[in-house]
Amino acid sequence: MRAIVLGRDFTSNNYAYFYPLISGYSAIKLQIIQDVIEHNLYAAQSADKINWNIINMLSGKFIIVPAQLNYPFLTFTAKDDEKKEVLYTNSNALPKAWFVKDVKKMKSSEDIVLFMNNSEFKPDSVALVLESDSVEKTNYDGRGNIKLVDHNPNFIELEVQSDNQQFLVLSEIYYPKGWIAKLDDKELKIHQVNHILRGVEIPAGKYKLTFEFAPPTYYSSLTYLWIGNILILGLILIPGILMLMKKKKV
C-alpha cells in the first residue's frame, strides 16, 4: 500500500521517509510516470478532477490533503493542525496484485492514457494494453486467490491460485529492462498494462509467482569488478612474493 499527498505538498518528499509515496521521493521520474501525473491524476470527469481510479490502481491507501474531503470510501484517520493537513484511509485502494475480467486492446499509448480519465475505466476489472501486445485471450472470470509472500525493492513473491486461466495486474511500475517474472521458475512475459503497470498471464492451478530485478549489465559490472580486484591484488602480491623468493635463494 502507498500514500499520496494531494495539493501543495505533492512533490515534497517529507513523507517518503516514513511511507512509500505514489509521487515517489525523487524529482527524476520515468516518462510513463510523468504521463500519468500530467494527464491523469487531476483529469477526471468530476468536479474536483481527482482521478480516484488512478489512485486506487496505484494502491493509494492513505490520502493526505490540506482540506476535508467528503467521499464514502474515505475514512478520517488523523489531522495535523500544525501543517493543516488531514489524513484519510481509502477503502477502494487496490492491493499489490489482482485478477481482472477483461483485457482491452487500444491503438496507442495516448488512447490508453485518455481512456483512464473516463468514468468507464474500472482498473479492478479491466486491463488496458496496446493492440500490438501479444495477449490473445481477452476475457477471464477474475476469480482466484493472490497472497503477497515477500516484497522488497528488487524482489516480489506472490502465491497465486485459480481454477481457470487468469490475467494478473501487479501494482508496480512497468520497466522492461531488468525485471524478470517467473511462475514456478518458468519465465513469463511481462505486459505493459494501463500504461504504467505490469501484467502477466497465469494458467489454472497453484503457483509461486516471482518478479526479480536482475539486469544483465549489473551482473556484467560485478564480473568486471571482481576481475579488476583480482588483478589489483595480483599486482600488489606478486612483487612481494618474488622478493621473498630472491631472499630465500640468497
Image: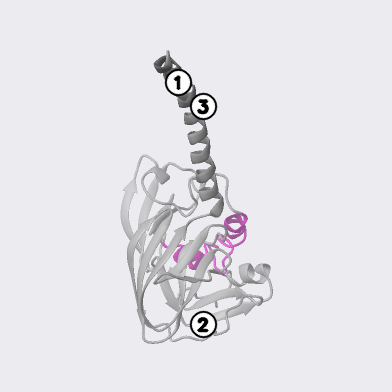
Mark 3 — residue? 235
Within-10-Å neighbours for mark 3: few <14, some 14–19, many 20+? few
Residue 102: mark in rendering = 2
Within-10-Å neighbours for mark 2: few <14, some 14–19, many 20+? many
Does residue 26 appear in the picture of this structure?
no
User: Of the residues shown, which amino acid type is indicated by label 1?
Assistant: Gly
Residue 101 at what x, y percent from top left? 47, 82
Closest to the observer, 236 or 4: 236
Residue range in magenta is 31-59
Closest to the observer, 229 or 100: 229
Give the Cα distance between marks 2 and 3.
62 Å
User: Of the residues shown, which amino acid type is indicated by label 3?
Assistant: Leu
Give the Cα distance between marks 1 and 2.
70 Å
Residue 236 at what x, y percent from top left? 48, 24
Residue 240: mark in rendering = 1
Q: Is residue 100 above or below residue 26?
A: below
User: Of the residues shown, which amino acid type is indicated by label 2?
Assistant: Asp
Picture residue at 59% right of the left edge, 53% below the top = 30
Picture residue at 39% right of the left edge, 47% below the top = 85
Give the Cα distance between marks 3 and 1.
9 Å
